[in-house]
Image (cartoon, rainbow, N blue to C red):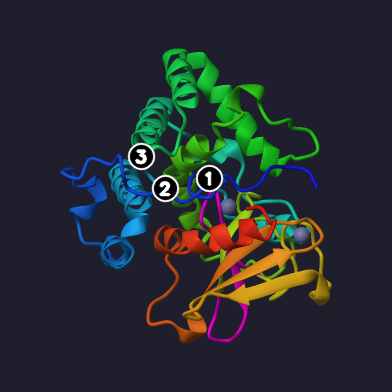
């Protein structure tokens, strides 16, 4: 299949880093305000000190996202229900890049800050970090790369991944998240039931996570815009494989999480099992809490 694995800075194939080099005196930006996500992350940090570095980076990213989102206005989107229904029916994602009306100086600020944070927590190599700095210095280079990055999901047949972007996808993905998730909110009330694809109905991004609802349905969560949509409870969203005996599924020891690993395309998807849970799924928390499951899946030869 075409396209690259969902870029996630914490699931990059490297072992979960111990918190050796993280300055202990720092209090991550996001930790100050007690949103449900930060509260859960701090709880998780106390329970699993091995995840401290990943959790502190996540707290910083949440703080950044909150600051930038407060500055963003909801994009004005064309909401004609007939047009949206026709797009969903045809398997075409709803959000065009131009709908986002991005303020590029805001974006450049977020991109640079995400890259600096990832470097500080060693989720980005020095060489890659230098390339992000070069991109920020040349104002006219960053914009077309981001437009192209968006098109690799929405127009996979015609868009090639931008060469300048190789290795920097996680930075673009995290920097775009506040802009995309804000726009996705404007579309969240739409009924996606006509959508049968494994990618996101809003932006065509790949799923990064899933949740099993109390009704035993499976919702997928977008790696780009964080939208949710219902998908077959077993089939692989990456390659469409529906053969149950070609999908390996296993649960975490506490039963809260589950992995679906596809024996066709060798990719895996993590899920939160809300049937046995005290709180709803939280993408920012559950992707970190399941880092040990990533390691287990990768050991079995699967990839994110
Ligand atoms: Zn999306
Ligand atoms: Zn597959």
Outermost residue on the top side: it is 138
Image spot of residue 247 (x, y percent): 76, 70
Give the CA separation, mark 1 to mark 3: 13 Å
- The residue identified by callout 2 is 17
Query: Where in the image, quadrant-wise, is ligand 2 located?
Result: bottom right
Q: The magenta stretch spans which residues?
A: 212-230
Say whether residue 224 is magenta: yes
Residues at circles 2 and 3 in contact by the CB criterion of under 8 Å: no
Residue 138: horizontal and vertical position, in percent? 47, 13
- What residue sits 52% from the left and 22% below the top? 142
In the picture provided, is 116 more to the left or to the right than 237?
left
Residue 256 versus residue 220 in the image, above or below: below
Identify the residue under disc 3: 121
**Mark 1 or 3, closer to the camera:** 1
| Residue indicated by mark 1 | 14
The image quadrant that residue 250 belongs to is: bottom right
For the residues bearing labels 1 and 3, Cβ distance under 8 angstroms: no
Cα–Cα span, label 2 and label 3: 9 Å
């Amino acid at each position: 299949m075409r396209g690259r694995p969902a870029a996630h800075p914490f699931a990059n194939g490297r072992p979960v880093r111990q918190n050796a080099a993280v300055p202990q005196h720092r209090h991550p930006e996001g930790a100050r305000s007690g949103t449900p996500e930060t509260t859960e992350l701090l709880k998780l940090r106390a329970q699993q000190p091995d995840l401290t570095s990943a959790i502190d980076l996540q707290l910083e990213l949440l703080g950044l996202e909150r600051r930038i989102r407060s500055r963003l206005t909801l994009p004005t989107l064309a909401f004609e229900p007939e047009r949206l229904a026709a797009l969903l029916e045809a398997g075409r994602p709803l959000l065009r890049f131009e709908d986002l009306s991005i303020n590029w100086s805001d974006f450049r600020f977020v991109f640079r800050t995400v890259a600096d944070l990832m470097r500080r927590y060693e989720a980005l190599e020095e060489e890659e970090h230098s390339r992000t700095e070069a991109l920020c210095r040349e104002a006219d280079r960053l914009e077309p790369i981001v437009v192209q990055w968006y098109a690799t999901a929405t127009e996979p047949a015609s868009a090639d991944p931008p060469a300048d972007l190789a290795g920097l996808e996680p930075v673009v993905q995290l920097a775009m998240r506040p802009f995309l998730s804000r726009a996705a909110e404007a579309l969240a009330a739409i009924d996606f039931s006509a959508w049968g694809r494994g990618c996101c109905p809003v932006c065509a991004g790949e799923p990064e996570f899933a949740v099993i609802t109390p009704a035993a349905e499976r919702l997928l969560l977008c790696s780009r815009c964080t939208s949710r949509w219902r998908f077959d409870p077993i089939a692989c969203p990456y390659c469409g494989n529906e053969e149950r005996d070609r999908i390996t599924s296993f649960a975490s020891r506490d039963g809260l999480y589950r992995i679906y690993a596809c024996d066709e395309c060798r990719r895996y998807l993590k899920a939160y099992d809300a049937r046995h849970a005290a709180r709803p799924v939280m993408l920012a928390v559950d992707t970190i809490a399941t880092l040990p499951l990533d390691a287990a899946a990768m050991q079995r030869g699967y990839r994110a």
